[in-house]
Amino acid sequence: MFLKALIRTIRQHEKLTLLSLSFLIPALIMGSYFAYRHMAPFGNSTLLTVDLGQQYVDFFAYFRHTLLNDPSGLFYTFQKALGGEMFGVWTYYLLSPFNLILLVFSDHNLPTAIFWLTVLKYGAAGLSFAWLLIKTKVQPHLPVLAFSTSYALMGWMIANQLNLMWLDAIVILPLVIWGLMQLMTIGRMRFYVGWLAALLIINYYMAYMVCLFTGLFFLWRWLANWTTLRQGLIQLRRFIVSSLLAGGIAAVTLLPTWYALSLSKTKYTQTDWSAKFEYFPTKMVAKFFLGSFNFNQMPKGTPNLFIGSIAILGALLFFMQKKQPRRTRWLAGGVTLILALSLCFEPLDLLWHGMQFPIWYPYRFSFVVSFWLIWLAANTLQPDFSPKLWQIGIITLIVGMVIAYVWLDLKQFSFLSRNQIVIGGLLFVAAGCLIALPNKRTWVYQLAFVSFAMIELTSNAATSLNHISYVTEPEYQNYQQVLAKQAKAVTSSDQSWYRMTPTFMRTKNDPLSGQFNGGSVFSSTLEKSMPTFMGNIGEPDGDGFVTYTNGTLLSDSLLNMRYFLNQQSASSSASSPLSSSIVNTVSTRADLASYQKIRQDGLIATYKNQNALPLGFVASNQITTLKNTTKDPTQYQSNLWAALTGRSKDRHLFTASNFNRVVFQNVKQQTKLTGAILQKSNLVKPGVITFYFTPQSNDAYYLTLGANMNDDNVTITMNNHTLSQYPTYRNTVVVNVANHQKGKQIKLQLTMKKGSLWLQNFTLYQFNNQQFQTGVKQLNQSPLKITSYNESSLTGNVTIKSAHATLMTTVPYSKGWYVTVDGKRAKPIQVAGTFMALKLTKGQHQIQMHYWPPLFNLGLLVSLVSVGLCITIYWWKRKTSLTSRF
């Protein structure tokens, strides 16, 4: 009785009911699974994993702080490494309308906010696809829920749910396609233009992939429905004009973002590629089996294509049914072939990713392939469709060959087991039987059809996500609470401009969530000049990240690192939240002995660096001609300091020092250490090299380590404790091993992890503390005294004592900075390939700096003109009584 009443209700309010259910089914399925896994707010686990836990959650915290407290951070922030534009970050990560949910939650409860964001996006994806099927009358009745659920819970969504900023594309793609079909059939532009412009604004990266797919979809429909040359040209003109209008409306974000990318991501555009297959193409069929995903598929795997057995069989049958014209089927086959080649042929794969191979999450565009296959299936499995015996025979043969191939070559597919193949085979058989049943109009059949799809897709989601581990809620909340508390203690007592850095880290984006000016960041839109500079001075860096974990007395002073948060020994306070080992110490800083301890709170001690230079100071004119001629970070720092002070002897602040004694255990002895290749004597036994040295002064001592000296090859201990060091670095880093330790023996021990070890750039240096102090006093004589500031502007005064001088700042150079000196526009110059400097004359000057995104004004103008054109077209069509066609 209940089922009959439910069916009766659905029929009375069919469209509204189906749309509601298309949202609720995937949302409830995933919400229930997350609750079962005890995800917050239903337990102590979270959805934070990989980049969502290491990158995006901190951007979400920054999103909240900016909108609720300081809108000046919309365009720029000094919390991004040493400072950088934020417009590219917003347009890639943060412009989703769903993100407004974050404003309701505190930083402490962001894991709960992310739960609701994820669940709502799953539901919205099902809703939009159901809308498309109902509006096009492809599937107007109950079976629409099977296809909307297949779309919302497809393998791509499950594998990429952690990349929350991408999921809006899944929601909007069906709406763009609906708008495109309106454009082609009745000439109405507004849906296509509006939704495509919205996606271009929300996430340009995924929008690019949608644009490519939309072009393919248009060509398919255009050529399949071609009747006359005139009609074809009219449709082509509408498509081009509408696409340009959508791009024009989005220009206010696209043009500034394009400029930001020209300084960051596009610097890594792939220029060399081969016309080759990236893997044997048939391997991708293994992804059609239930649960075909695990952690190893994230960094490097085959495309995520699971859409359920009903959708797969329906897509295959599309090419065999005669209801569709032969030209339509042949053209659809061409589109399918292009998409299939894109999933394995390197040039096409590169094209879909904007000419850059993705770092992790390969084949990011495969969601359009899943959309295409589900769309073909929905067009095939109509209520009146009944497959012929020969059609059943062909799909049985194809499925049998796929199962046999995967079964016999199972060792290639680490994400599959024989049980999964057996279950997958049974599901294909069951789906085939459902499709083969003749009477598809009864409510019993339709309910069984939908239920089958729901059960299969739920099983796939659970099986796939069970392979992934997540950050616990206390792990996130305890660290976030402690970091925020410690940072606020400093910023509330000192409200001047400075930088601060912890010696521990949860993520490289800690400054963004902790709301302090740091030196680390992890962002796809990081300006290339920043990793270059950080690598030059011996900090860990990569194409999209930098970490300020390997500072020296010199770099601390130069970069205005005034405060340090240091984790003490756990024995000092067992009551602190940090005693639960949630803090990862990534920095060895004996130099803290030179700084003043100003606060102790549990395990966290705060130090103040009295040698920190101001953000701007008068320096020698030599800095304007400095060129980097060395790969040695200690020499680069010395050269940079000498160019600032104008004293040639400062080029020798670091001098190489010898170890007093070296002991080799199961390692062939070497007389020359730096650059030596050490070999184990017995490969079975451990190979250990122990270095001893005793500082003869209270100067600082530093050890350089080449990129080969990483965790993969060697374990390093200092005085029998593991040397704290951020593990990922590609250039030589500088490690602080002693300071104010005259006469105290230092023991460094290297334990080889392999049969050989290259001591790449392994050199001990002594720093001249006294000479450095002289330089600090000199550079502090004419400081830029900042009188007011926010995230994107600075105002200060400086007194110049010579006829001509250079005001050096550690503000990263950008064409977006508008600088005035005494109210007159001034042109800053770039120094050291990274920073901004000004040429000034003698006297007192007021300096004002304001950041405004390059091309933003032009983009705004183009957007306004495009909107104006849309209004004009609408008005013209209304005037000519053709309103319904816009």
Image (cartoon, grey):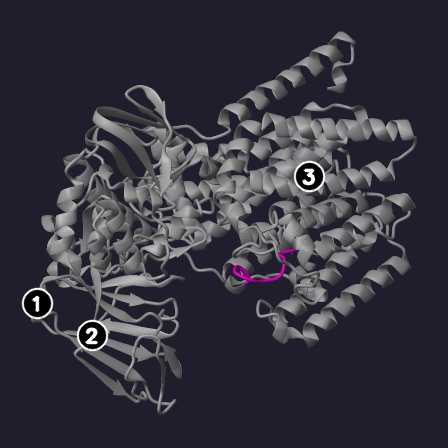
Type of amino acid at the residue the image marks with label 1? Lys
Dot 2 falls on a residue whose secondary structure is: loop
Task: Specify whether residue 531 is painted magenta.
Answer: no
**Is residue 751 shown above or below 43?**
below
Residue 476's tag is: none
Q: Secondary structure at mark 3?
A: helix
Quadrant in the rendering for residue 213: top right
Amino acid type at image mark 3: Lys
Question: What residue does disc 3 label?
Answer: 4
Residue 66 in view (yes/no): yes
Checking the image for residue 742, the label placed there is 1
Q: Residue 390, image x and y in percent?
A: 90, 60
Q: Earlier in the sequence, mark 2 or mark 1?
A: 2
**Residue lying furthest top in this view?**
879
302 in magenta: yes
State which quadrant residue 232 falls in.
Answer: top right
Residue 194 drawn above or below residue 206: above
Magenta span of residues: 297-305
Q: Position of residue 313 (x, y in %)?
A: 77, 55
From the viewer's side, name the closer residue of 40 and 626. Answer: 626
- In the rendering, at what x and y percent does residue 854 appear? 47, 30
**Foreground of the two, 511 or 589:** 589
Image position of 561 (left or right of 742): right
| Disc 2 + disc 3, Cβ < 8 Å | no
Distance, label 2 to label 1, CA atoms, is 15 Å
Tag of residue 658: 2
Q: Earlier in the sequence, mark 2 or mark 3?
A: 3
Neighbor class of circle 3 (other Cα within 10 Å; few <14, some 14-19, many 20+) is: few
Q: Between tags 3 and 1, which lies in front?
A: 1
Badge nearest the viewer, 2 or 1 = 2
Screen quadrant of the C terminus: top right
